[in-house]
Image: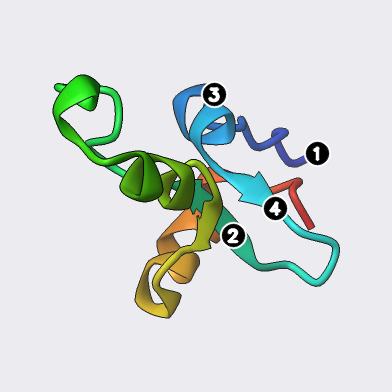
């Protein structure tokens, strides 16, 4: 019998997987020194962004049951 694969919990908390299998992430550097950033920049950074495609192969190994 093969062993079960473990999900990397830290990555599972940081990444959201869509129904089509794409990875979405938060914008970086938005909480630190937030009062100095413009409201327009803060609103734009609160959205989720797609992850780079070259990182998806590594993430599929970290999140084996996300698909």
How far apart are the alpha carbons under marks 4 and 2? 5 Å
Q: Are marks 3 and 4 in contact (CB under 8 Å)?
A: no
Helix, strand or loop at mark 1 = loop
- Label 2 and label 3: CA atoms lie apart by 15 Å
As measured in the structure, the alpha-carbon distance from the residue carrying label 1 to the one carrying label 4 is 29 Å
How far across and down, in percent of the image, does residue 18 sit?
A: 76, 59
Q: Of the residues under marks 2 and 3, which one precedes in the sequence?
A: 3
Could you say which disc has been placed on residue 17 in the image? 4
Under circle 3, the secondary element is helix
Q: Nearer the viewer, residue 55 or 1?
A: 55
**Quadrant (top left, top right, bottom left, bottom right) of the N terminus:** top right
Separation (CA) of disc 1 from disc 3 = 24 Å
Marking on residue 40: none
User: Counting other residues with Cα less than 10 Å from the Cα at mark 3, is it few (<14), some (14-19), or many (20 or more)?
Assistant: few
Look at discs 2 and 3 and give the one toward the viewer. Answer: 2
Observer able to see residue 27: no
Report the residue marked by disc 2.
23
Question: Residue at left 49%, top 55%?
Answer: 59
Q: Mark 1 points at which residue?
A: 1
Quarter of the figure with the C terminus: bottom right
Mark 1 in CB contact with mark 3 (< 8 angstroms): no
Which residue is disc 3 drawn over? 9
Vertical comparison of 46 with 53: above or below: above
State which quadrant residue 20 falls in: bottom right
Where residue 15 sits: x, y (%)?
A: 55, 43
Secondary structure under tag 4 reads: strand
Q: Nearer the viewer, residue 60 or 25?
A: 25
Task: Return the disc, 1 or 3, that comes first in the chain's sequence.
Answer: 1
Mark 4 surroundings within 10 Å by alpha-carbon count, few (fewer than 14), some (14 through 19), many (20 or more): some
Q: In this view, does 19 lie to the left or right of 15?
A: right
């Amino acid at each position: 019998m093969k062993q079960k694969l473990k999900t990397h919990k830290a990555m599972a908390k940081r990444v959201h997987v869509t129904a089509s299998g794409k990875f979405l992430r938060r914008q970086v550097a938005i909480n630190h020194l937030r009062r100095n950033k413009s409201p327009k920049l803060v609103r734009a950074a609160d959205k989720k962004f797609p992850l780079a495609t070259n990182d998806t192969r590594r993430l599929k190994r970290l999140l084996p049951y996300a698909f």
